[in-house]
Image (cartoon, rainbow, N blue to C red):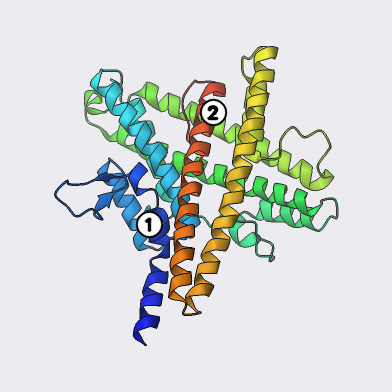
Amino acid sequence: MSGPLCRLVLLLCSVPLLGVRAGVGKYSRAANENRADEEVVEFRIQRLNQVWEKAQRLQFSPVKLAELHSDLKIQEKDELNWKKLKAEGLDDDGEKEAKLRRSLNVILAKYGLDGKKNTQTEDNNYIKDGTENDVLNDPRLEKLWNKARTSGKFSEEELDNLWREFLHHKEKTNEYSILLDTVSRTEEIHKNVISPDENEIKAEDLHNKHTDLKEKLRSINQGFDRLRKISHEGYSGERDFNEPRVNDLWDLARTANFSQSELESFKEELKHFETKIEKHQHYQKQLEISHEKLKHIAGTGDVEHLKKSTEKHNALTDKFKQLGYKVKKHLQDLTSRVSKDGLNHNEL
């Protein structure tokens, strides 16, 4: 392999890493002031950096790396807030700490970083090549999706919206399974301790976890009923929102203790939130196109063109990463406002 071509290949292989480092100035702190400038860490919590570094070693796509970065930034913010609460003695029962552990478990399982095989979820792109069933992993969902897309009741745009709803439902189901497994393991610890005083998780905490699980299961069942109805009847003209996460929030708001004026105000905020999500999805598509373009340019042997395109790709990655964090943080804030128990939940 010639020298110039070898350099091109090496540069291309580094594209995902370049992309996720575009925001170094804003999101990173030097691990040690005596280290070289390029030796920086993305997060202030060591175990989050370990997760981040593992994802880089696995060469995740730029989109998946940026999404993981947003999730870890939310996790980092929550953990730093918890440390302040703990210092003030406001988490004596350890429940907030337990919630943070479960949240991190959700992130690890979502991206296949939990050490388990076949747990990594696929990129949530719009799939048009007939391979949708490969990522739904649920015969009931596959049957509904096949029925919907062959029914002739949906436009292409409506099928895109419906596909997002199916993926969102799958993600909610995966999250429920992870939390159920976490609670089950906690219960085993609770049963096997010799002295109740040695057990950090009290019976009341387990009760709260079961309440949380029941709410999530209720949401999953309602979501499946909605998908079944839409798949058979098509969309009506009375939809308030297209984005499934916004629909979930709206359903929660209508059952919350809101006055009519508060409900109307919340609905307006959801409209703005949906616009933000759509903007984020637009940047996701642009980032995917940019990555494919870089692969093509690398094959041409044009070093200067590749350098300029890489710089644009890095800037786009940084924009997508920042907007992704804003979307996830906004979602967390909105969810906490309409949650019946007033707790924050990371809907990943």
Of labels 1 and 2, earlier in sequence is 1
Q: CA distance from mark 1 to mark 2?
A: 28 Å
* Outermost residue toward the left in this view: 34
- Crowding around mark 2 (Cα neighbors within 10 Å: few <14, some 14 to 19, many 20+) is many
Answer whether residue 221 is visible to the viewer in this image: no
Under tag 2, what secondary structure? helix
* Outermost residue toward the bottom in this view: 1
Q: Is residue 234 above or below residue 268?
A: below
Residue 335 is marked as 2
Q: Tell me residue 218's x, y (percent).
A: 61, 32
Q: Which residue is mark 1?
A: 55
Image point 54% across, 33% down: which residue?
331
Disc 1 + disc 2, Cβ < 8 Å:
no
Q: Tell me residue 346's x, y (percent).
A: 47, 35
Amino acid marked by disc 2: Thr
Q: Tell me residue 167's x, y (percent).
A: 62, 49
